[in-house]
Amino acid sequence: MNNLQGGRRQSCQKALVSLAASALPRPVDFDALRLHDDQLAKITNKTVKRFYQDQNEMIDRFTEVDRVIEALKHGVTPSEYSSLNDQDRHDEEAPRLTSNKKGAEETAPLLTKSPGQQPMYTAEPINEKRTALWIIHLAINISFIANLALFATKVFLALFSGSMAILASAFESFLDLVSNGIIFLTIRVIRQKDYYTYPVGKSRMEPLGIIVFAVIITTSFTQVLMSSVQRLTNPEKAGEELDLSLGAIILLGINIVVKAILWFWCSKIKGSSSVDALAHDHENDVVFSIASTIFPVVGIYLKMPWLDPLGAIILSIYIIYEWMQILLENIRRLTGQAASSEDLKQLTYMAYRFSTKITAVDTVRAYYNGDRLLVEIDIILPPECPLHEAHDVGEALQDALEMMENVERAFVHLDYNAHHEVEHRRVVDGVGFGG
C-alpha cells in the first residue's frame, strides 16, 4: 500500500511540474507598471494616489500567482523558491526543465501548502530581506515582558491615584495579555491535528477565539464606561481630586517611551506577521497611554477633576467601537462572506495562466471560511481530453490554488462546456425556508 501511495505521489509531483512548465507566459511585466514609494510620494491628488496604491496591491497579487507557478516549475514550494537567489535559480533551471521535458526519473520534493493567516492580503515581495529568527523571537518575548510590567504599573497607579482614565488604560493592557493568551491557546489547538474528528482542520478556531475575546473586551469596557458615567454624573465623586504625584507622572511617561521604542523596533522587523501585529498593538498603546495620561494630568493642573472620568468615557467608547468592528468582521467571515473583487481577479488570473489545456474559465467563486478563503472554480477542458489528463489538470490547479496565502481550501470542477445551471443554487435557496 505504501509503495502504491508513494508511486502515486511521485506521479502527481511529475504532473505538477509538467503542467507548470506548460503554463501560459505572463501577459505583461507587472513590475514595470509598479509605482515605487518615492513616486507615490510626489502625487498630491489623493484619488490618483489611491488608484496607484490599489494598482500596486493588485500587482502584488498577480506576482504571487507568478511566484507559485515558477515554484511549481522548479519543483519546490513558493517559500523555498523565494529564498533562492538569482544565481541558484539560473543554475537549477536548465537541468530541471530539461529532465521534465524528457520524462526522466528525477523526482521533485513533495509540494506542501505554505502556512499563512491573513484577514487582509499580505503577500510579501520576493526580494524582501527577512529579519533573523532570533531577533523575531526576542522582539516577541520582550514585548510580552514589557506588556506585563506596564500592566502592573498601570494597576498600581490607578489604585494609588483613583484615576478612571488610567484604570481604563490598565484594562486595555490586561486585555492585550488576555488576547495573547487566547491566540497562543488557539494556535496550539489548531496544530493538534485530528483528521477523523476535524477532517478539514481547525483553522476556524482562531477567528472564533477572536470573537470570544471581542465579547470579553467590549463587556469589560462597557463596565468601565458605566462606572465613569456614574462618577461624572455624581457631583460628589466628580469633584474628588486625584492624587497623582510627580513620580506617578514620570512612570506614565516611561510607559509611553517604552511602548514607543517597542513600536519603532517591531516596525523595522520584517518577515513575521506576529511581530507586525505587535507593532500595531504598540502603536495603539502609545496613543491610548498618551490620552489616558493627558486627561488626569490636565484635570489636576486645571482643577477640573471631571476631565478624568470624561477621558475614561471617551477611551471606553473608542475601544468598544473598534472591537465591535472586529467582532462583526469575524462573524461575517465565519458565516461565509464573499471574497473581494481583488481576490477574484487574482484567482481568475491563476486559472487563466495555469495550463494551455484550459480553454475557458467558467465560474470563480470564493468566500471566507474563517481567516482565509474557500475557492470554487469551474474550468472548461476540450471534450476529447482524456480522463487522466483532465484529472491531472484539476488536481494540479487545486494544489496551486491552495499554495496561495489567502486560500484555505480549493475545489476545481471540470466541464466540457459552459452551458449549465449554477451549482448548489437549489441548496442555498432552500436554507432557512423549509425546503
Image (tube, rainbow, N blue to C red):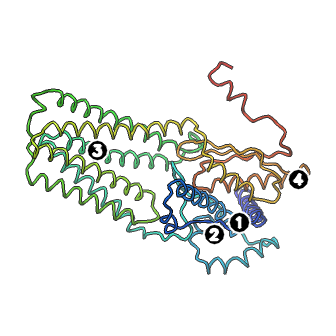
Horizontal side, residue 53 vs residue 395: left or right: left
Secondary structure under badge 3?
A: helix
Real-space Cα distance between discs 3 and 1? 48 Å
Secondary structure under badge 2?
A: helix
Task: Identify the residue position indicated by label 2 in the image.
Answer: 32
Which residue is at 14% across, 47% downward? 297
Where residue 172 is drawn, which disc sits there? 3
Task: Identify the residue position indicated by label 4 in the image.
Answer: 385
In front here: 407 or 287? Answer: 287
Where residue 28 is drawn, which disc sits there? 1
Where residue 203 is drawn, which disc sits there? none
The correct choice, above or below, for 143 with respect to 170 in the image is: below
Which label lies toward us, 3 or 2?
Answer: 2
Real-space Cα distance between discs 3 and 4? 61 Å
Real-space Cα distance between discs 2 and 1? 9 Å
Which residue is at 55% across, 35% downward? 335
